[in-house]
Image: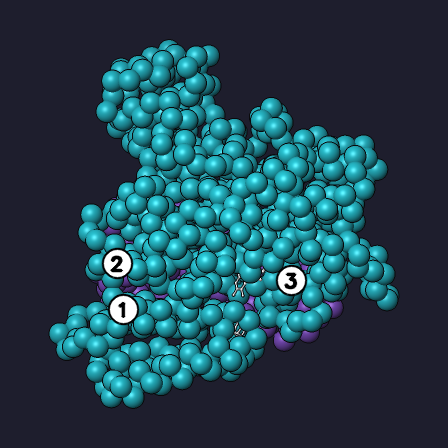
Amino acid sequence: MNKTTATDVQHMVHQIIADLNHKPGALMPILHAIQDELGYIPSDSVPAIAEGLQITRAEVHGVISFYHDFRASAPGKHTIHICRAEACQARGCRALERHAQQTLGVDYHQTTLDGDITLEAAYCLGNCATGPSIRIGDDIHGRVTPARFDALIDQLQTVPLAIQPVLAKEDNTHG
Amino acid sequence: MVKVFVPRDTTALSLGANEVAAILQRACADRSVDIELVRNGSRGLFWLEPMVEVETDQGRMAYGPVTPEDIPALLDEGLLDGQPGHSLYLGPTEEIPYLKNQQRLTFARAGIIDPVSLDDYIHHGGYVGLRKALARIPQEIVDEVKASGLRGRGGAAFPAGIKWQTVLDADARTGSSPYSKRKFIVCNADEGDSGTFADRLVMEADPFMLIEGMTIAGLAVGADTGYIYLRSEYPVAHKILNEAIARAGKAGYLGNNVLNSGKAFHLEVRLGAGAYICGEETSLLDSLEGKRGQVRVKPPLPALKGAFGQPTVVNNVLTLAAVPFILAEGGQAYADYGRGRSRGTLPFQLTGNIERGGVVELAFGVTLRELLEDYGGGTASGRPMRAVQVGGPLGAYMPEGQWDTPLDYEAFSEVGAVVGHGGIVVFDDTVDMLDQARFAMEFCAVESCGKCTPCRIGSTRGVEVIDHIRDNQERDYHLNLLEDLCDTLEDGSLCAMGGMTPNPVRSALNHFPDDFHQDRTTASRTPAGEA
Ligand SMILES: Cc1cc2nc3c(=O)[nH]c(=O)nc-3n(C[C@H](O)[C@H](O)[C@H](O)COP(=O)(O)O)c2cc1C
Ligand code: SF4
Ligand code: FES
């Protein structure tokens, strides 16, 4: 992904639009497909989407901004969603959320300074009998105590050495 | 070869089921034992997950909750022969009282079959309903659903048969629309309510049942296309559904010519994007059409002008999942369960601070207390239970005095509560009900579609007012203001998001007034987002 150039992106966006345009109500599938590829929906892909679907740019923007999932800027390498909803509250998610924000040094919708982790809020992950629950990428974890949270973060930061960015990594004590 | 089952639904995975499966396979290979590993769905006994089952001559034997570290000892002590001995041995799965005492119609196959095996599904009674439906005219199918007394399981409890009748009778030839003459089946799989996961477990443990239910709905009303609008928070369900749909298509259960009947039914999963309001049916339809998920003014009803302006059945996952049983066994067989006007069964979901969390499918009429105590076994923390929220974030908090209420739509409504989608969230005595009321307002502010001022702005005001109450700033004035705000939300909201947010707020105020009159000058609570 690091080597993806602007023209690659444009090409890919056009390809996605061409592939999905025929679907009734194609906008949501197109936005999901772009975000799956890039992690976000670049603002310069909006004109192409608008043109492909014969709607206005304002309409495309309106849809992107309406939904919590869609992002207009790149997320960190990993996205962590913490469930904030009632069943997880009953199991301590308020304390978990404070712990996560403090250890990562970020609030919701923010990315750690080293670009590693984006923190997001979720309102129920459907894992309500075994909370607190969090989601990392497509993996959902149950009974996440603060200690377990730290262990999961450690795993994220230590396991995939091979795909670490070339940039020097800061340690995690900022903020 | 021994058949061993390790579930792969979200909850089992969230507790390490993949690691258990991997270690088990490796350990068996090391010991040169061949096993057939089946990745089933959970039985819904979540406190026992990951629960490993082994098929024996005496039926399936269960062990749980299993960690990877337990595997060597389990194998040493005869796991593969279903032997007792290890402390995690639970005996025959079907004899576990939590499961044995249920009345499982919708969850009859959950955890038993491989969710994406069509053979398994058919061997366990699947597609009997569709075959019967194919032998009937549409009106007879609708009549069967009417006879079952089935009411929508998504929250509003509207009779499914009457909705289907409206769509069957609707004239689909609307003007020059490219969708003219068409009707649609839309499955509401947005399951946004906290404390609910029954839809998810249907999709992850028995997806063909939903596919069959939607296909029958298509036959009943004359729709050739269905959409499952699935929340994006369910990546596991997404994968399993797509796999099941592909397999059903290959085997001729979906497509242009369903089981050579000459009838077409196509099915596609569409993902939401993290908006609670898209569970509301008209907002869902706008989202499906590629718009902002804003609530539409009714009328027109979606049954007449739904997806792409065409007549549309919008039903919850559990509603559609009940249909194969109703067609296979007859509407009366379903209606034989239940109480009053609440017919059939509901999969209740025990969640939050509960010792034995999971899915408990029972006929309507069981009391909340029976569920909390006999099934749930009290709180997980071991502390006294204090409040129970039933029916999702828009449902009331119920104090102990109300726990003997039988779970049926009318009985709950009499005490100002809702059954909704059957989610039950338990809190122990450390809960601060002012925090819960505040969260209800905050949630409404975050998830409002923005159409109505009371909902959009009033909810933010609600958070501020509750903060003033907490900080003891002109408390009586602000308590009155909170009541006024609740009135405004109830009167001035287009849908239940704004209209029912007062439920959790008022029930917290009325049943737990102490929490709103405490001196909190020493409170150390940090509001979300301030860390
Ligand atoms: C704010 C709000 C959220 C809702 N969320 C859901 C949901 O997540 N799933 C669902 O099936 N119904 C939900 N509903 C109810 C739907 O609007 C609709 O009644 C339902 O999909 C109809 O299907 P049923 O008759 O089978 O229940 C919601 C309603 C409101 C007002
Ligand atoms: S009550 Fe709220 S969510 Fe419902 S239509 Fe009005 S603004 Fe939208
Ligand atoms: S409330 Fe957190 S997973 Fe449902």
Considering only order in the chain, which callout, 1 or 2, is on the residue closer to the N terminus?
2
Please report contact status of discs 2 and 1: CB closer than 8 Å, yes or no: yes
Instruction: Please give the residue where the numbered disc 3 appears in the rendered image.
Output: B285
The tint of chain A in the picture is: purple
Front label number (3 vs 1): 1
Q: Which residue is mark 1?
A: B512
Q: Residue at x 63, y 65 (%)?
A: B282
Disc 3: which chain? B
Which one is in front, A168 or B183? B183
The residue under label 3 is which amino acid type? Answer: Leu
Residue at 25 percent of width and 84 percent of height: B475
- Identify the image quadrant of the C terminus of chain B: bottom left
Tell me if B170 is positioned left or right of B294 in this view.
Answer: right
Label 1 crowd bin: few (<14), some (14–19), many (20+), radius 10 Å: some
Badges 2 and 1, same chain? yes
Q: Secondary structure at mark 3?
A: helix
- Residue type, label 1: Phe
Along the viewing direction, whichever of B480 and A130 lies nearer the viewer: B480
The chain shown in cyan is which? B
Residue sticking out furthest to the front: B340
The residue located at (36%, 29%) in the rendering is B96
For the residue labelled by badge 2, is the local secondary structure a helix, a strand or a loop? strand
